[in-house]
Image: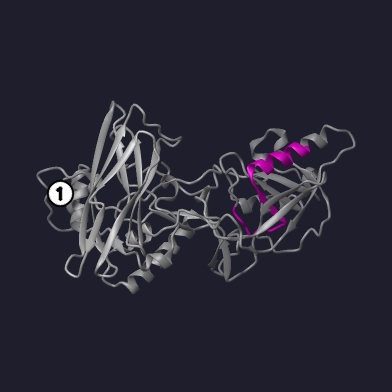
Amino acid sequence: MSVTNLAPWLTTVGAGTIDRDFPSQVILGNGKKLSGVSLYSGAALKGKMYELVYPGKSGALADSLCMDNSLDPKMVRGKIVVCDRGSNPRVAKGLVVKKAGGVGMILANGISNGEGLVGDAHLLPACAVGADEGDLIKAYISYSSSHRNATATATIDFKGTILGIKPAPVLASFSARGPNGLNPEILKPDLIAPGVNILAAWSDAVGPTGLDSDSRRTEFNILSGTSMACPHVSGAAALLKSAHPDWSPAAVRSAMMTTANVFDNRNLVVIDEASGNGSTPYEFGAGHLNLGRAMDPGLVYDITSNDYVNFLCGIGYGPQVIQVITKTKVSCPVRKPSPENLNYPSLVAIFPVTAKGLSSKTFIRTVTNVGPANSVYRLKVESQAKGVTVSVRPSRLVFSESVKKRSFIVTVNANTRTLELGSNGAVFGSLSWSDGKHVVRSPIVVTQMEPL
């Protein structure tokens, strides 16, 4: 429930990796080689082994995090220093090590970052490693210090740029997760896009680390974040709008969501970097952006301004509050609309925790044909969840020159006695419409929670 930007008229974007990486390697004195990443491009260590120290061994948090003025130059001068990730900027830790006379840095993830790695343009030879590798390095230092005449040593080897990485995409560990804490009926995030180690234009007003003391200047930099994934989707939306000027923002988003990839370049479900398990719609929404397919989605789920007004009425806003946004007079329907009936490209069935036995939820959705006029779409439902059945009427949608829109009803039945929710409190499935060329896919989420 860490995802933000939850409004249904926003496209909410998570981050994934691409098949390009900037690997580096920590080589320990005991011969072990550990994989990491780095964008360091200065003078290399050339295989020379240096003494390895972990200031955090003292038990002081500031020392382990390599905070400003925390390192004793006598302890770190001429050595490679292990710093824990967290609190201060990753690149700033390297500067602290450099100022204290260290020759290199190993930046170790803690349990909260897991194995998720981000490349940085460090000011000294430095390599980021995952939590498991960090623990191995610390154990090696600890073992060496407890054995007389043994000194922990290491060097860092930089591998440059490598393409064709598998698996890709992988869901970034830092990407915010659903469910939607404000309106759980609307699945968020909507989709993911490239957001890890992205080549991006850079101002020459600051160095690549953004630190005041970084005198280097570059026109491009490598950055990571959902702040990198979101511009990919913004650019994709602009291209879709230029190809289809008559599409609404909701149609543009629908095209991106219903054509997104849920499989990586090994044809397996996209992995979540944080857990090492397959991702779910709470992590990647409808999947990873596929602009080529989004250009020709076949069908779109369109949403009008009036639909959004009805949605706001359905979640308890009155006409006077809604008018603050619409700037025009609005009226709410006499019968309160169901928020889950907003014509969204994903479906979330929420059953109360108190429900016992069989319960059902019904959704109405309308699709607009933006492909060949005379088309027939057939249904495919995927749901292996125990205690859940999904039925759709009709199971065939027929379009013609005169019939551009078709509606269908989705019924999700859950037997709360046999329903087995996953570790994130939900089970997942999908429904797809296909005419043989296009596949229009919508994620389905089934969960139990008390009304917010």
Q: Is residue 125 shown in magenta?
A: yes
- The picture places residue 308, in percent across and down from the top left corner, at 22, 53
Q: Is residue 317 visible in the rendered structure shown here? A: no
Q: Quadrant of residue 213?
A: bottom right
The furthest residue to the left: 334
Could you tell me the amino acid type at mark 1? Gln
| The N terminus: image quadrant | top left
Q: Does residue 217 sit above or below 7 in this rendering?
A: below
| The C terminus: image quadrant | top left
Q: Say left or right for 172 vs 243.
A: right
Q: Residues within 10 Å of mark 1 (few under 14, many from 20)?
A: some
**Please, what secondary structure does the residue beneath circle 1 have?**
helix
Residue drawn at (31%, 51%), measured in percent from left and top?
7
Of the pair 384 and 204, the residue shown nearer to us: 384
Q: Is residue 2 shown in magenta?
A: no
Which residue corresponds to mark 1?
320
**Magenta-drawn segment:** 118-141
Q: Does residue 111 sit above or below 168 in this rendering?
A: above
- The picture places residue 51, in percent across and down from the top left corner, at 82, 46
Q: Is residue 154 visible in the rendered structure shown here? A: yes
Residue drawn at (72%, 35%), measured in percent from left and top?
57
Q: Quadrant of residue 234?
A: bottom left
Residue drawn at (26%, 47%), measured in percent from left and top?
392
- The picture places residue 264, in percent across and down from the top left corner, at 52, 55
Q: Does residue 359 sit above or below 334 in this rendering?
A: above
Q: Say left or right for 428 vs 401.
A: right
Q: Say left or right for 345 vs 80.
A: left
